[in-house]
Amino acid sequence: MGFLGTVQTGIAYILAFLAPIAGIGGLFYANKIFRDFMTRPTGTDRMRDIALEIEKGAKAFLKAEYTYLAAFVLIVFLLILSSSSLGWQTGISFLLGALCSVAAGVSGMIAATRANVRTTASASENGSADALFVAFSGGAVMGLAVASLGLLGVGILNYMFGGDAATVKHITGFAMGASSIALFARVGGGIYTKAADVGSDLVGKVEASIPEDDPRNPGVIADNVGDNVGDVAGMGADIFESYVGGIIATMAIAATLPIEKIAELTNNFTPDGAETYRMALIGTPLALSLIGLISSLIGIKAMDKLKEADPSDALRKATIYAAAIFLGASLIFFLFSSVAVSVWMAVVSGCVAGVLIGLLTEHYTSGKPVTRIVEASKTGSATNIIGGLAVGFESVAAPLLGICAAILIANYFGGLYGIGIASVGMLATVGVTMSVDAYGPIADNAGGISEMSGLGPDVRKITDELDSLGNTTAAIGKGFAIGSAALTALALFSAFTQAVPEPISVSLTEPLVVVGLLIGAMLPAVIAAFTMTSVGRAAGDMVSEIRRQFKEIPGLLEGKEGVKGDTERCIEISTKAALREMIAPGVLAVVAPLIVGFGLGAEALGGMLAGALVSGVVLALFMANSGGAWDNAKKMIESGDVEGESKGSESHKAAVIGDTVGDPFKDTSGPSMNILVKLMSIVALVIAPMLV
Amino acid sequence: MGFLGTVQTGIAYILAFLAPIAGIGGLFYANKIFRDFMTRPTGTDRMRDIALEIEKGAKAFLKAEYTYLAAFVLIVFLLILSSSSLGWQTGISFLLGALCSVAAGVSGMIAATRANVRTTASASENGSADALFVAFSGGAVMGLAVASLGLLGVGILNYMFGGDAATVKHITGFAMGASSIALFARVGGGIYTKAADVGSDLVGKVEASIPEDDPRNPGVIADNVGDNVGDVAGMGADIFESYVGGIIATMAIAATLPIEKIAELTNNFTPDGAETYRMALIGTPLALSLIGLISSLIGIKAMDKLKEADPSDALRKATIYAAAIFLGASLIFFLFSSVAVSVWMAVVSGCVAGVLIGLLTEHYTSGKPVTRIVEASKTGSATNIIGGLAVGFESVAAPLLGICAAILIANYFGGLYGIGIASVGMLATVGVTMSVDAYGPIADNAGGISEMSGLGPDVRKITDELDSLGNTTAAIGKGFAIGSAALTALALFSAFTQAVPEPISVSLTEPLVVVGLLIGAMLPAVIAAFTMTSVGRAAGDMVSEIRRQFKEIPGLLEGKEGVKGDTERCIEISTKAALREMIAPGVLAVVAPLIVGFGLGAEALGGMLAGALVSGVVLALFMANSGGAWDNAKKMIESGDVEGESKGSESHKAAVIGDTVGDPFKDTSGPSMNILVKLMSIVALVIAPMLV
């Protein structure tokens, strides 16, 4: 191996070791953004009060949630330590993964709860462009925290354990830690936010006929808290899991590649240097993620200029710039590295598939299908519901074909390793995609604050526009989360089949595999049942409480000066419900792979993972997109753009019912699917060496 | 091989050759039942008129539908003939399969449209027990026709082609013929019935506030026609397909068994007689089905006595008697045959799983879960819908675990062959289960006729009770149809993997298989979108027409003497819509396996079949059970058993919306899933020899 050869094999390895430093750099930059927008004005006392209440509620929930999770994490940690085949390294990785996920969630949520009121104030004092910038900056803290903590955590472990094939077995613990937190955060957050949302809407909008976000409604603060704990902290944990899951799965695949595969995937291969080349392949996902983080930073920085454009254009351009820079830079990386340039095509396929899924989601949740639901609303709620369900089912096809195309391309250019790399490629610029995504709930909160604090129609108009854009970005974010979860789970699945003591083929002609497949396909439906029932029950509690307050607190419903509802009681109800209801689905997701793996064997477990993957992705797309489409059908009628229809018309009432059904679909049950399939795959990967 | 040995190997073979004779016998008995109840009274002129209108409408639809299908069948027939690897035998089998399916559907539907008015008349003249008997007799014609024509058709082909391993390749064409008819009949019938039902309800019950089945509503006759074309002819074609599909798949598996497997599955095995033993294994599914037909006849005959008991008990007992006799007689068969007695356990597992799925369906569609939906209706339609969807998702788990248990047991005792035998066991007593199932729409029609012809409350009470029981049996029938479709599809899938030139393993570590799995999992969602959109669109047409008639025909809405709505126009709308909308899903189901099979190869096609199977079964259970539960939640409120609630209350209105959403769920989209998975598997099996 000459000098060039050394550089070539070394570059991925070196970049992988630089990952923690890049992670620290990213965190510093996130902190700078945070300090910058913290100097912004915070508006009136009333606005500050409301913002503080939201922040307090969100912190209280996370504190309670993490107390539970600490116990769970501790138990699993001890179980890992006590297992002879896993060892302390996996235990430490698990702890670190859980810790990084919590840190990403908490920092993102603090930023969001500070940015919301400053967005409202900016809209009031400086206008739309500045408000957009503040909301985006709030989201950027989350985006950068997710990417940086992921790089930092995995990077440190990679460094600690040596960056070779033996390393990876331990690092899988990191993904499992991240995944455990994610499941509870997503499910708990999802139940919290929809219990509050559905509950306050049912009493407020439907029974008492007061507008959304009306300060008289004591459930409104809980609803705003919910946006932060569900759509910010929950979503962040979800994407964090995909991000590190994709990296780690790819490392795991590289660690078990047979020598002839290594030869195919690398240039200048000499058999005696195989393990060096393997280390380059192991380092590549970290190297790509490092490049992605830097590209994201550039995209985020570009918002300084972009904010003057149309808000929707600005967000789209920031994302596309980052993706383009990432693709260019990663091509350069492959040209200089010892990994074959053809593998770059896998990066491209993942990256393009991510963008495509986002666009498709936008179509189904704000394009022509929404008009069809609006039409159907004219004959009542039954046809509105049927129409929305049909749109949801229809929306499954195109994104799944996109994922299939990415799999085929990635596989063609890099085999199973290529599929892993595709998931890394899709998520590498997570810094900026997550920023755009977290922008949504911040803008939503900003709208709520301006309504509750009674700001003028000019301000409301700006915050409404930003909020409406946020709905679209949130829907896109959900599609992206599903797509990335699918690719990540597939990469984890592939890693699993190689990580068992004897590589398995998971053949569907084995009845045990078919049984696993059926059980796996069933689990997403069970989780959907759990979470929908939970939201229904928790919303019922909320309805009773708000009704009670309207009845027992004189002057509350009439909006008498100085009369305030007991918002804390509502927050408490959501918190308790979320914590109580997240346990069953969480435990099921962790325990199911253990039961099937140890009870029916590795092949059946493989079947189960595949079954859960396909059924989970189908249900996730169905639920997320029908929910988004119902939401926007309602908004379209409210906007007055539909002839003869407006707020309060019969069609609007039908559309409100569809929107309410869609709430748990898109924000609780749908997103839970992503985590379910990833978490089960990770648990399987961790226990793989112990299976027969 | 001694004398005993000759008898042992011969018995399955002999019984298989007797199958056509048993089939003819069954048909004669069905004809006797038909002639018996045709002598019954037919009530008043008004009743006869209505019944005639229903019969005319149903016949007109079937005629139009079969004209389309004749063209489709002809094209496929010619394609098969022109294929060098399939040959004329497959072509003939295909034609015969299509013909038998049509014959079963037509005879069942004629019996049903004659039995309905006689049920009403019996209720009016002789009371409940006699009315039950007439309705059941009407169903029994269908049940016996399905079983007898299946045995006759497959039996004749088996006899013609020789009953050995080479035979089976040709017979698969029979299943494909049956399956093609089934798809269009189920989808077309499902769209017909729900367009009429949803359309008339939306205008009649919701807008004009007139009761269900009110003669003023011009859509009501179309609704009653729909029960016959959807729930009788469509359901019959569906079950016919499962029945022959299970038999043929098991024969196909036997035809490709390796010699050591034959040794395991047979007693007194000597290697030189392997092919003789194979013929015994090939004959066994036909022999079992013959035993099942005779058991069914005894169960049906028992109704002569059972009718005096509680109606629900009577139907249950007839089913259980037949199943018990079948299990006993088949044990005797195995004791005397050369097939190992342990294979009998596979029969038991299938038979028990079928009963279990029925009971579980009953629980979810009429037990405690329904009470939960009633509770949820109290806070409005949104919570009613959320509650119903949650019940649907929840109901997926237990039946799927039952199917898994059946697979594991059947596989343990007989490998892949055992799984095929389990599906045969589940369906062997189809003569009686299908009778109970077809009883439902007949009782429903009988209720409609008594309402429309203005019979007194005493008669209505009897027909209402029989109708309500029919709802439960229909729900059970749907569960059974799904369970049998799953096992049959699995058996067909197994046969497919062995029938390709080189047996394949369909390994999930192959990316192409994963891509197939994803595409397969997506297809049921696409079919659901198609069919729900179709029902929505067709119901919309119906709504416009009924509104027009109420507006333009003076005195119609007021119920003026002598004023009649244009029912024929409504029937035409349903007919046209059904024919137009059934094409896209039908073509997709046939073409998808061709594209994937010839485009991506046999392994990918295998993955697709598995993906469609699991996703299809999950969606089918979800849709059928949520639909059934919504329906019964509405009925529970109407019955007055819920405190403080009654027809017209807010909860009732919410429940009506849930019921309307559930209509296409349970009667159009859900049932389409069964056929989709079976048809694709059969197409795959037929083209298997041509794949690489």
Image: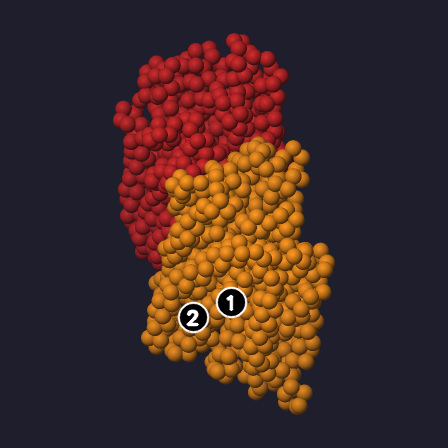
Chain colours: A orange, B red
- Name the residue that disc number 2 marks: A686
Residue B402's disc is none
Quarter holding the N terminus of chain A is bottom right
Tell me which residue sits at (33%, 31%) in the image.
B643
Tell me which residue sits at (56%, 12%) in the image.
B555
Along the line of sight, which residue is nearer the eye, B211 or A138? A138
Q: Quadrant of residue A59?
A: bottom left
| Residue A426 left/right relative to B487 | right
**Residue B402, how many percent across, how many down?**
36, 49
**Residue B412, how many percent across, how many down?**
35, 57
Residue situated furthest front in the rendering: A561
Q: Amino acid at mark 2?
A: Val
Residue A107's disc is 1
**In the rendered image of this protein, does residue A435 appear above or below residue A368?**
below
Mark 2 residue crowding within 10 angstroms, few (<14) / some (14–19) / many (20+):
many
Front position among marks 1 and 2: 1
Mark 1 residue crowding within 10 angstroms, few (<14) / some (14–19) / many (20+):
some
**In the rendered image of this protein, does residue B301 appear above or below residue A507?**
above
Q: In terms of secondary structure, where does tag 2 sit?
A: helix
**Badge 2: chain ID:** A
**Residue B107, how many percent across, how many down?**
47, 27
Quarter holding the C terminus of chain A is bottom left
**In the rendered image of this protein, does residue A304 appear above or below residue B133?**
below
